[in-house]
Amino acid sequence: MFKKNFSSKIIKVGFIFVMVILVMVWNPRSVFDGLGNVFFTATYPIQKIFSSSANKISFFAKTISSIGKLKSENEKLLYENISLKSDNAKLKDVSKENDILRNEIELLPKEKFDLTAVHIIGRDFYENNDWLLVDKGERDGLRKGMPVIVGKGVLIGRISQVFPYNAKIVTITNPESNINATTVETGAMGIVKSKYGLGVILDMVLQTDYLKVGDDVITSEISQNIPRGLLIGKIKEIHLSEDKLFQTAIISMPIDFSKLRFVFVIKK
């Protein structure tokens, strides 16, 4: 009961106080000017505290807002910076590819062959360079069996599968690849293939044929769909076969297949 009466008194006092304030602010006919001055003078320290607190709160709110804006602007600048770096890297890469392609085209035997440039978009997952996937296919006139070269006529392999927009190239490092070849200086004949542990070799060379270290190995005229004279590599080592009936020459490759970005298909 006591609490209820006390609460009721508090409410009444508060109501009267608010009314007094409103009347003093409204101040009809300046009746309460003196009383108002006394009241505002007495409450000045409290007003000062509230005013200072309000200013601090306002400053704090503006600071938080400014920090938020700066953070947003920094994130935007960071994103733009990353985008610019990405675009710059892409431009450099495209420029490098254009330089590579331009150099390759200058070296190509264009007067001998009908060539189509293709971009390598996939390769052997096991990094043995046994096959390559390129960005052109049947719609671009590519056919199974067509030879693939780089530079002045260095043989890479030949097309093994053709799709509408892509083609798969089996390189000469693939164990399934077999290419008839000959040496330039001595005319020794054999078959170029890949052998585990030895790399690319010139195999099945008769003992009556003369092999020479440093001699160039090129495609022969009996290679199906492959013109004579495409470079395969140089003889690095010479060995007898296990049955002693033939000679085998290990071939040093003139290019690194893993770094190829463009190759050229001989269409005719």
Image: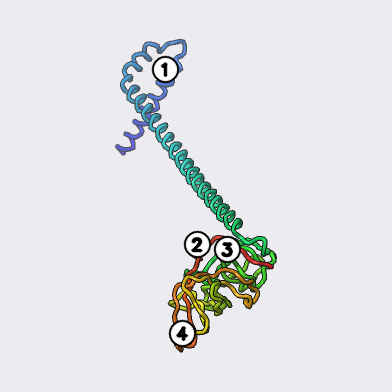
Which amino acid does the dot numbered 2 rest on?
Answer: Lys
Left or right for 264, reference 31: right
- Nearest to the eye among marks 2 and 1: give it: 2
Left or right for 197, reference 155: left
Which amino acid does the dot numbered 1 rest on?
Answer: Met
Q: Which residue is mark 1?
A: 24
Residue 10: image location, x then y, percent: 34, 31
Q: Residues within 10 Å of mark 2 (few under 14, many from 20)?
A: few
- Nearest to the eye among marks 1 and 3: give it: 3
Q: Which residue is mark 3?
A: 150
Q: CA distance from mark 2 to mark 1?
A: 90 Å
- Indicate the quadrant containing the C terminus: top left, top right, bottom left or bottom right: bottom right
Q: Which residue is mark 4?
A: 241
Query: Sequence order check: which comes first, mark 4 or mark 3?
Result: 3
Query: Sequence order check: which comes first, mark 4 or mark 1?
Result: 1
- Nearest to the eye among marks 4 and 2: give it: 4
Q: Is residue 46 above or below residue 204?
A: above
Query: Sequence order check: which comes first, mark 1 or mark 3?
Result: 1
- Nearest to the eye among marks 2 and 3: give it: 3
Left or right for 102, reference 89: right
Q: CA distance from mark 4 to mark 3?
A: 31 Å
Q: CA distance from mark 4 to mark 2?
A: 32 Å
